[in-house]
């Protein structure tokens, strides 16, 4: 009886894992398929990857994505770390609400509110800057949560000891807090980098016409037709974010286990 | 807990506090809270002739109106689309619970070392781009002639949100005391009864928090119906996107966004209450 229920549990779980992985595997496999149609396997080729390298629009979009991701995750790491430390250390009940609501609400709401704000209030031309600001806004909360979790797992004694030994708040931060939260900062940076390079919904609203990112480029391609070039760019993007997530998981295992 | 926090706080003066909390607070006030209020304000404005809003300089009468709300309540189509968004969100959540349960249970009952790997395997597909995951379903469903149907929309929604259900459910199941199941077994309960009378009720808080993480984003999703659904599968998200980017009726889009916000807050409130009630139940049992 026990054996059988165990067996059913494994079978059901394997089916769900297959549900998670088969679709992505199909995307990867067909990126190497020597056929215009994504219908049946013809033969192995790297032609779609070569085509990508020659696609100026795609390369420009990739460049934009990387630049925005680097800048936005740098700023978000600094601001998010400050928010995380403040949430851990000070009694400011409104702060978690302000920091975490942008993470919890549907992305479309953040997207349209920023669109309205940039166009109607600031009268700004949408583009690089508006995308950058939007990405920082949704990344801060993730970094803050990671940093706070790291601080919560630490012995308060080390900070008290630093104070008792006469360290100023700045010295305590520089010599004690910062080295201790460094893994969380790196994990937070990688997390926001991944979120930024992956973001479609919010970017879609604040990008305007001038600047394209990789997800926007993919969107306009798959709206039109299914081509193996999309499979190729998807596969590369998957490899990149996979590496990031694996590194982040290594650095902050307790945080990642709890999910987003 | 509060005492410890006071101890932490006592060492730093008021200015350090604000030096640390100030910059992120100012940033989020400017780029999150203020824009959120602007959506509220915009919903009471008149749409401009070429998109945007009628300028305030045109005077109070010309710039402000309840027109967007009157329009929304005047046409049954909007109520229908809200209803079908809820229906899709509900179906997605339900399917996610069914699919996530065996997985979460298996992970929770695995030996520690294997547990981390199994959790990682749930998170990994999630690391691929959101559009790539939708694209995978375009590839799969296209040849089967299932693309642009309600089925495709639900399949895509479930696929994109499943990890959000697995993780909280697993976190909950992991905490269950195996002694409870043993006790039930000693009292003669079979596997079926043990599940429905012990494990399932205890896992309700996990189901509630997972449901909030699935239901809420599904309610506002526009990309899945846009890419996988047919013309009849429009949800609130598509309606909002249409008003902001295609029709350029920003007041109507804002009013719809507020409708969505209210729906989201209501769902979050229900989930929080459910999780709390569930927790009380747990205490009563243990």
Image: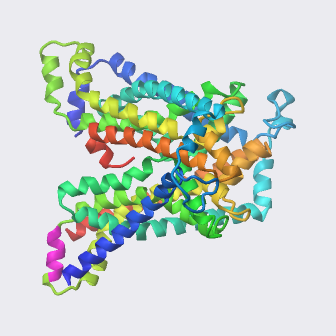
Prevalent SS, magenta region: helix
Q: Is residue B29 above or below residue B120?
A: above
Image quarter for residue B134?
bottom right
Q: Position of residue A33 (x, y in %)?
A: 54, 53
Direction from residue B232 to residue A229 in the image, left or right: left
Direction from residue B216 to residue B197 in the image, left or right: left
Q: Is residue B224 above or below residue A3?
A: above
Residue at 80% across, 46% down? B247
Image quarter for residue A121?
top right
Q: Is residue B125 visible?
A: yes
Query: Is residue A77 located in the magenta-colored stretch of the structure?
Result: no
Residue at 44% across, 51% down? B126
Q: Which residues are magenta?
A: B178-185
Q: In this view of the protein, which residue sits in the foreground, A160 or B248?
A: B248
Q: Position of residue B186 (x, y in %)?
A: 12, 83
Quadrant into which the N terminus of chain A falls: bottom left
Query: Is residue B180 located in the magenta-colored stretch of the structure?
Result: yes
Direction from residue A254 to residue B263 in the image, left or right: right
Residue at 41% across, 64% down? A18
Image quarter for residue A160?
top left
Q: Position of residue A194 (x, y in %)?
A: 45, 38
Direction from residue B177 to residue A40 in the image, left or right: right
Q: Is residue B217 visible?
A: no
Q: Residue furthest front?
A: A43
Q: Is residue A51 above or below residue B172?
A: above
């Amino acid at each position: 009886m026990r054996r059988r229920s165990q067996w059913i549990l494994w079978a059901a779980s394997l089916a769900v894992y297959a549900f998670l992985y088969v679709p992505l595997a199909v995307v990867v496999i067909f990126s190497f398929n020597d056929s215009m149609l994504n219908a049946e396997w013809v033969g192995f080729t790297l032609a779609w990857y070569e085509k990508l390298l020659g696609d100026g629009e795609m390369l420009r979009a990739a460049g934009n994505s990387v630049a925005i991701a680097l800048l936005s995750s740098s700023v978000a790491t600094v601001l998010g770390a400050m928010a995380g430390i403040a949430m851990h250390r000070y009694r400011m009940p409104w702060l978690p609400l302000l920091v975490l609501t942008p993470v919890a609400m549907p992305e479309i709401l953040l997207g349209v509110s920023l669109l309205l704000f940039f166009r109607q209030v600031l009268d700004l031309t949408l583009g690089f800057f508006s995308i950058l600001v939007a990405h920082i806004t949704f990344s801060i909360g993730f970094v803050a949560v990671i940093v706070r979790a790291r601080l919560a797992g630490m012995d308060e004694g080390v900070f008290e000891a630093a104070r008792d030994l006469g360290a100023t708040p700045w010295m305590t931060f520089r010599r004690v807090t910062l080295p201790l939260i460094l893994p969380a900062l790196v994990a937070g940076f990688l997390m926001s980098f991944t979120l930024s390079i992956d973001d479609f919904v919010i970017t879609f609203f604040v990008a305007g016409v001038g600047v394209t990112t990789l997800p926007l480029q993919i969107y306009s391609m798959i709206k039109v037709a299914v081509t193996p070039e999309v499979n190729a760019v998807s596969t590369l993007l998957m490899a990149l974010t996979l590496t990031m997530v694996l590194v982040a998981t290594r650095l902050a295992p307790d945080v990642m286990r709890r999910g987003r | 807990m509060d005492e410890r926090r006071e101890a932490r706080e006592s060492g730093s003066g008021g200015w350090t506090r604000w030096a640390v909390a100030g910059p992120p607070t100012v940033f989020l006030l400017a780029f999150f809270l203020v824009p959120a209020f602007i959506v509220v304000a915009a919903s009471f404005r008149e749409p401009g002739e070429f998109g945007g809003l009628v300028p305030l300089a045109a005077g109070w009468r010309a710039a402000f109106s309840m027109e967007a709300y009157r329009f929304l309540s005047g046409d049954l189509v909007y109520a229908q689309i809200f209803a079908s968004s809820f229906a899709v969100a509900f179906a997605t959540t339900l399917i996610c619970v069914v699919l996530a349960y065996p997985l979460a249970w298996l992970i929770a009952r695995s030996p520690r070392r294997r547990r981390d790997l199994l959790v990682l395997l749930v998170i990994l597909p999630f690391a691929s781009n959101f559009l790539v995951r939708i694209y995978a379903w375009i590839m799969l469903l296209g040849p089967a002639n299932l693309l642009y149907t309600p089925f495709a929309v639900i399949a895509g929604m479930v696929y994109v949100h499943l990890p959000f259900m697995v993780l909280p459910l697993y976190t909950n199941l992991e905490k269950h005391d195996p002694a409870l199941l043993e006790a039930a077994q000693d009292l003669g309960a079979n596997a079926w009864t043990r599940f429905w009378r012990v494990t399932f009720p205890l896992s309700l808080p996990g189901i509630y928090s997972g449901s909030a993480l699935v239901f809420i984003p599904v309610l506002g999703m526009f990309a899945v119906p846009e890419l996988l659904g047919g013309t009849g599968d429009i949800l609130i998200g598509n309606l909002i996107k249409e008003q902001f980017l295609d029709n350029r009726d920003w007041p109507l889009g804002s009013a719809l966004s507020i409708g969505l916000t209210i729906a989201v807050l209501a769902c979050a409130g229900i989930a929080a209450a459910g999780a709390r009630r569930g927790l009380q139940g747990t205490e009563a049992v243990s």
